[in-house]
Image (cartoon, rainbow, N blue to C red):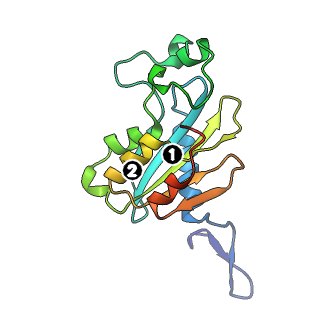
Amino acid sequence: MGNNGRKTASDGKAAVLYKRPPWDEYFLEIARVVSSRSTCLRRRYGAVIVKDNVIVSTGYNGSPRGAVNCIDSGICKRKELNVPPGERYELCVAVHAEQNAIVNGPPERMKDATIYVAGFEADGTVADARPCLLCRRMIRNAQISKVVYLNRSGEIVTVENISELDQEESPRN
């Protein structure tokens, strides 16, 4: 074997033993794994920033450094107050995955990069990972040029013009 995962067939042609995933699927799968570090009781999000097919930074949604994690305390203030999804985020202690990925990465590597975002409900079903308004602003300021995310149906959505994200409201707002 040894030929990059290929073996030679008896007729001399290479037989591929596996299919490599396209880059978008590959980095979204990494975002899914990153989301497993989330400290939120309601949803898990993971973000991966990539430039030239090299990972620049990762982030997941969770409490700021030094703050008590909701997953550790078992308390979600928004849930306790029956706040509907998309409202009163000032009550939430968490920092979004996109925000963490941006602030944890080197600013000089953000320009013209791509951010991949995947999200999951507490029960493991796919959540819409379209960045919220605040995250879209941070993505713009970081000069990230492309956003790739999973929508609620699990479909890959690619946005190469960040202003297109502002055309309709995010379910996460």
Q: Is residue 119 left or right of residue 65?
A: right
- Give the residue displayed 57% in from the left and 73% down from the top: 3
The alpha-carbon separation of the residues under discs 1 and 2 comes to 9 Å
Which one is nearer the viewer's eye here, 32 or 153? 153
Disc count in the image? 2
Q: Is residue 112 left or right of residue 23?
A: left
Relative height, residue 45 to residue 88 (above, below): below
Number of other residues with Cα within 10 Å of mark 2, as a class: few under 14, some 14 to 19, many 20 or more? many
On residue 139, the disc is: 2
Q: Position of residue 136 (x, y in %)?
A: 43, 48
Residue type marked 2: Ile
Relative height, residue 158 to residue 68 (above, below): below
Are the residues at dot 1 and dot 2 in contact (C-beta closer than 8 Å)? yes
**Residue farthest to the bottom, as pictured:** 11
Q: Position of residue 106 (x, y in %)?
A: 27, 49
Q: Position of residue 28 (x, y in %)?
A: 56, 52
At numbered mark 2, what does the secondary structure look like: helix, strand or loop? Answer: helix
Q: Is residue 16 left or right of residue 146?
A: right
Q: Earlier in the sequence, mark 1 or mark 2?
A: 1
At numbered mark 1, what does the secondary structure look like: helix, strand or loop? Answer: loop
- Give the residue displayed 51% in from the left and 54% down from the top: 165
Q: Which residue is mark 1?
A: 131
Number of other residues with Cα within 10 Å of mark 1, as a class: few under 14, some 14 to 19, many 20 or more? many
- Give the residue displayed 40% in from the left and 61% down from the top: 145
Q: Position of residue 153 (x, y in %)?
A: 72, 49
